Amino acid sequence: MAILSSYRHIVSQPGAAAFSASGFVARLPMSMVTLGIILLISARTGSYGLAGAVSGAFVIASCLAALAQGRLIDRLGQRRVLLPAILICTASLSLLVWTVEVGYRLPLPHLFAGLAGATMPAVGAAVRARWTYVLSDSSARQTAFALEAVVDEAVFLIGPPLATILATAWHPAAGLVAAIAFGLAGTVLFTSLRSTEPPAHPARPESGTAFAMPWRALLPVGLISFAIGGLFGSTEVVTVAFAESLGDKAISGALLALWALGSLLAGVLTGTIRWRVGPIVRVRFGVIALTALMAPTPLIDEAISMGILLFLAGFAIAPTLIGAVSFIEQAVPPSRLTEGMAVLHTTMAAGLAPGAAVAGVVVDNHGVHAAYLVPICSGLVGVVAAVATHRSTAALTFPEAPGEMVDLAERHAE
């Protein structure tokens, strides 16, 4: 099919299919860990507030450590950073399961969740850095970023129902244990693929010139990403509670999977389009559409209607995130690309934590329907940021040639 020809071209590059596939397995914990924590703790304690707080500790630590990890990956190389990180993360999540099972509520679950979040490997950023390394054509890179957005959505399509089924039909800890296994196996395989690994960029290059990060250019997309993260984190918690209010917590996995499926389909289409508007414009319109589509959720009280609405809302997710990744890839120096990608993940994680925690508290105290106002409010923050940052990015232009990225970074560096 013609629509798949652009994807066929990029995956035919030597080693590309292998690192993308192993990256998929390594990223499955993205969609399973926080949900697995919520399912485990809510089953053992009955408290969504505690579950949201522990999952919040995980994402806060991930947020705080992501930039540092991205910088280390750029300077030391992917294997030297990701391999030790996954070993520590695996041990920490295993200890988290143990503390919950034996009845600890404070502070050990929070501490182990935080350590696991701080060492969760930034495989998504590393995969995108590999695509930039192996592809020289900007159009091909756009398709690669769309492919990885589709992979991300496949992760969220498969992970939540898998974690939910394992936790509800087998054992409350089974979803989280599966996430641990996927993360370890996928990251070890990914780091073993050395031929496509980008070279390390030492802090002091041979030329003696260190390129600054263009923070002014990254701030607008970071603000919007923060708001989207809040929407994601709160929707996950509230949807689990919504399904339980219907008498079947397992439905939550299917609802979240429909959300991801809508985004996956939109991501496939995005990778086949030659856009005439800049990436930041796509980000702005995407966050507005996502918020508008989530607006009716507090009024819905049955699963089928909620599934349809989440499916439609999902169509706004992938194009927005692909635009954000394209913006960053064009704006930052190549020697700091992984760190630049980590900005997106950091700001999104910064929104995930309060979104999940606030949603859990609202569910416990005011019920499910009121709690769906939390993701809507998060989306409105993104809409305000999109409108408010229009002028600050209107004058920015983005080069097509990789060699021009450094000039852009220097012009907008503070």
Image (spheres, rainbow, N blue to C red):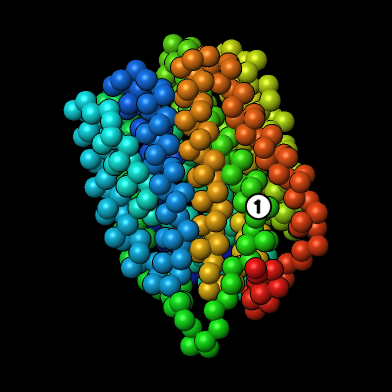
- In this figure, which residue is indicated by the disc labeled 1? 221
Please tell me whether mark 1 sits on a helix, a strand or a loop: helix
Where is residue 123 shown, x and y percent of the image? 43, 56
Between residue 402 and residue 211, name the one nearer to us.
211
Q: Residue furthest front?
A: 414
**Residue placed at 44% from the left, 51% from the top?**
64
- Would you identify the image quadrant in which residue 343 lies? bottom right
- Picture quarter with the C terminus: bottom right
Where is residue 59 shown, x and y percent of the image? 43, 42
**Residue placed at 47% from the left, 30% from the top?**
357
**Residue placed at 59% from the left, 68% from the top?**
213
Can residue 283 be seen?
yes
Where is residue 312 shown, x and y percent of the image? 66, 31
Residue 77 in the figure: left or right of residue 93: right
Between residue 54 and residue 239, name the one nearer to us.
54
Dot 1 amino acid type: Val
Residue 210 in the figure: left or right of residue 405: left
Can residue 127 be seen?
no
**Residue placed at 48% from the left, 32% from the top?**
356
